[in-house]
Image (cartoon, rainbow, N blue to C red):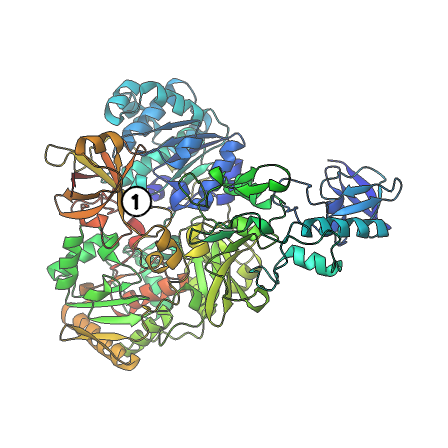
Amino acid sequence: MAGLAASFGSGAMTNSIGEVEKADAIFVTGSNTTEAHPVIGSMIKKAARNGANLVVADPREIELSKEADLAVQQKPGTDIALLNGLMHVIIKEGLHDEEYIKNRTEGFEAVKETLEEYTPEKVEEITGVKAEDIVELAKLYASADTAAIYYSMGMTQHKSGTDNVLTVANLAMLTGNVGKEGGGVNPLRGQNNVQGACDLGGLATVYPGYQAVEDPEAKAKFEKAWGVDELNPNNGLTVVEMVNAAGEGDVKGLYVLGENPMISDPDQHHVEEALKATEFLIVQDIFLTETAELADVVFPAACFAEKDGTFTNSERRVQRINKAVEAPGEAKADWKVFCELAKRLGFEMDYDSEAEIMDEIVEVTPIYGGISYDRIANEELQWPCPDKDHPGTKFLHEGEFAHGKGKFHVTKHIAPIESADDEYPYIMMTGRMLYHFHGGSMTRRSAAVDAYESDAYVEINCDDAVKLDIEDGDRVKVTSRRGEVETYARVVDIVQEGEIFMPFHYAESPANRLTNGDELDPKAKIPELKVTAVKVEKV
Amino acid sequence: MGTITVTIDGQQVEVDQQATLLDAANKVDIEIPTLCYHPDLTLHGSCRICVVEDAESGNLLASCATPVTDGMKIKTITDKVIEARKMNLELLLSDHPNDCMTCEADGACDLQELVYEYDVSEPSFGLMEEGKFEVKNENPFIEFDSNKCILCGKCVRVDNEVQCSGAIDFIERGFSSKVAVPFDQDLGADFSSCVFCGQCVEMCPTGALTYKPAKGQGREYELEKVETTCPYCGVGCQIELQVKDNKIVQVGSIYDEDHPNPVGETCVKGRFAYDFVDHPERLTKPLIKKDGEFEEVSWDEALDYTAQKLGKIKEEDGGEAIAGLTSARCSNEENYIFQKFMRGALGTNSVDHCARL
C-alpha cells in the first residue's frame, strides 16, 4: 500500500468490485483471482466473455490465463521489467494519454527517459516473455477506453514490492485510467478485514485514518481524544521487524491477536526461535494455534459469528457482522479483553457496545466520518465518507488525486534476492489455493473442505518431473537455505520449467519454513515470499 | 426507451418496451408462480407454471418469456390458467418421487409448495415409482439426485452465466434428460470443473441439489437466519448464516444488487468452511503456562497476571519494549480498540498486522 499511497495519495483499491463489468480491458497480474478472490474471479471471466479484453501476466498459467485474450508467463521477480516494457511500447505506439499526463500528473518526463531502454527485446531477455507478446499485451490494455488493473500479493511479496506497485500505478496513469469508473488500480485484499485493520491504525506508522504518528498535530489530536498526556512520537516496528526484535530481546512483551506467524511469516525456524525467546508472549485466538503453543498466556476469543461489529472490504465498504451463535465456554469478543487489561493498567476504556466504539472511531477518523451502524443498516457506504450526508465513494481520484497530482516514479528492474544455482536449481513461489485459507486454522478444521483437499502439495512442471524421476502423488522433499519440507508432488503444466509452487496453508508441510525473511522490501517491509531458491528430490 | 401500457387483471400498468408480462405483473404486485425463472439469469421458459391468459385470443402465454405489446389485456387467474398450471404440475409429478417426508428440501421446495397450493393430491399420471438415476454424492459438499430434478435449468444457468465454471449442463434426451457433469461423473470428479460455490443448490427449486453437511440438521423453517459478512477473503460477500440450536447448519445466499456479491455468489470457503466455529478444539478458557504446561485459569487471574507483566515491562524498559500484532481477521472496532490500548495504555506504536503477508 506504500506504493499506491506515494503515487495517488491513498493506498486502497481505487474502484469498486461491481465495476469489473464496466471495463473494456482488464489486466490481471500477480493475482490468482479465481482461487484467492473467487467471486471477483468469476466476475472477470464474465466480463471477458462479454467482450472485455482480458490480459494476464502471471508466472503460472492460472485459470484466468485460459480465459484471456493474451496471457504471458514472466519469470518470478521480473514484474518491473515487464511493466516498463509495456509502457515502452505504449509510448512508442502513441497510445498514452498525453492530456491526462499533462493535467493530472507529475514526474512523467523522468519515467519516460528510463523507459527508453526497456525495449521488448531487452524485456524478453529479463522476463522470458516473447517480444511480440509484450507488444500485443500493451496494445490490448492501452487501446481500451477504460482499462482496469487487478493485482494482489504476486506483485507485492517481493524485495521490489513497493517499486512493483509504483510501476503498476505508472502504467495506469500513463493511459489515463485512474479516477474513472470501471478503470483504476485494484489491489485485492487477501483477508476479510485487512483494509479495516489498516484504516483503523493497525499499522506502526499511523493512527486511525492514516494520520501519521510522527505528525505532532495528529499526536495532539489523539492525546486529547484518548485523554493521554503523552503519546509515543516515534514510528513503531512492523510485523517482521517486531518478531526479530522479540527474538533479540529488544521487545520483551509481544501481544499476538488472531494471527499465526508460525505459519504465515517467512522463515519458520527463525520465527519459532524468536517467539520462544520472547520474554512475555500473549496470544489471543480461537484455537491453540502453532503460535499460541509458544505463548505464556492465551486468551480465548469469540469468532466472527459470535459477535457484532464491522469489516471493511477490499473496495473500502464498511459492512456489518452480526452475532448468530453464542461463543463457546468463556470465550470473549476481543475488544472486551483489551478494555479489561487497560482498566488494570490504569487507562480507562469503557464501552457498552460495538456501536459505541464505532461512534468514537467516526469522531477521530475523517475517512469514516459519516459512518454509523444506523446508516449501514440501510445504505452501502465506501470510504471516504466524511460526513453523515455523504453518500460514500465508489471510485477514488475523480478529477483530482487525493494529494493533488498523481506522481510518476522512476523504477528499474531489480533482481530478486535469490536466484537458481547448482545447489538450489528451482525457484519456489508460494501462494493460496481455493479450498484453504491463510494459516489454515479455520479451513483445516472445517470437515468438508479438509476432506476434499486434505494434503499439502507442491506443483512441479512435467518436464522437471521426468528429470527428477517424480510422478504425480510421490512424496518429495523441498529444501531451501533455511530448511526442508516434505510434501506430495503434483505434476502439472501450469508452472514453467525450473519453477515450483507451494501453497502455504499446511502446518504439516509449511512452505514458510523455506522462505526468506532476511531482506525486506525497504519501504513496505514485505518479505520476498514469491522467490525462493530450492532443490527438489524424490523421497 | 419508450413505455407501453398493458392491462393485467383489470389494472393498467405502464412498463418498458423490453418488459415481459411477468415484469408487468410484478410491478403491480400481482403474484405469478414460477419455477424456472430467476431475475438474475437468462430466460428459459421451460416450466410453463407462469402461464397467463390473453383475454382477447384466449391463448396461454408463459409470462416470464413473453414480451409485452401495447394494449395487451392479460388475466392471471382464470379456470384455464389454473387447469394448465395443475396439468403442468401433474406432468412434473409423474416423473418425481413422492418422498417429501424424508426429502432434505421439505419446507423449502417450490414444487411442494405449488402442489399444495393447487391441491394436486391425486396426480392423474401417478408419481415416479422407482428412481431411474443414480444419486451422485461422493464429494463432501453437494448431493445431486437427478430423480428430483424438474429440468428447470436454473443450476445450469447460474453455473454458466454467473459462476462461469461450465461445470454442469443437460445431457441425453426425453425422459432420460438430466443435468450432469462431463461423463456423468460426480461433481468435483477428475474431469469436473465444479468449484463447489453452491450457487446451483441455492437456485434449485426442489431437493435435487442439496448441501451434504446440512443433511438431517434441520428443516428450513426451523433455521434462524442471520445476515453477515463472510470471514474469508477481502471481497466481503454478504452471506446468510442459517442456525439451529446454536449451530451453523448451512450458509445461504442473499440477492441484492447493491452488495459486492449481487447474485448471492460465494466460494467454497464461504459456503462450506464454517464448522470450525463449533469445533471441539475451540479455546474456551484462558490459559497460563506454568512450568512449561498450559493450565486453565479464571479470566481474573489471566487478566491480572498479564496486566502486571505488561506494566512491569513498561515501567522497566519503556513502552517501546512492547509490540502487538493486531488482526486482519478481527473487526474494525477490535482493531481500533487494540491500537488504542497499545498506544494509549502501553505507549508503543509497534502495532502491525499481516497485511504484508
Indicate the position of residue A233 as horizontal and vertical percent values.
Answer: 25, 60
**Could you tell me which chain the residue with mark 1 belongs to?**
A
Tell me which corner region of the image, top left, top right, bottom left or bottom right, holds residue A103.
top left
Q: From the viewer's perspective, is residue A254 above or below residue A414?
A: below
**Residue named by callout 1:** A431
Question: What residue is rendered at 56% in x and 45% in y?
Answer: B155
Is residue B335 visible to us here?
yes
Question: What residue is rendered at 13% in x and 47% in y?
Answer: A482
A457 or A130, which lies in front?
A457
The local crowd at label 1, few if under 14, some if 14 to 19, many if 20 or more residues have their Cα within 10 Å, is many
Is residue A367 visible to us here?
no
The amino acid on which the numbered mark 1 sits, given as a three-letter code, is Gly
Indicate the position of residue B237 as horizontal and vertical percent values.
Answer: 48, 52
As drawn, which residue projects farthest toward the right?
Answer: B56
Task: Name the quadrant of the N terminus of chain B.
Answer: top right
Q: Is residue B18 left or right of residue B106?
A: right
Q: From the viewer's perspective, is residue A91 above or below residue B160?
A: above
Q: From the viewer's perspective, is residue A176 above or below residue B103?
A: above
In the structure shown, which secondary structural element does the residue marked by tag 1 occupy? strand
A8 or A165, which lies in front?
A165
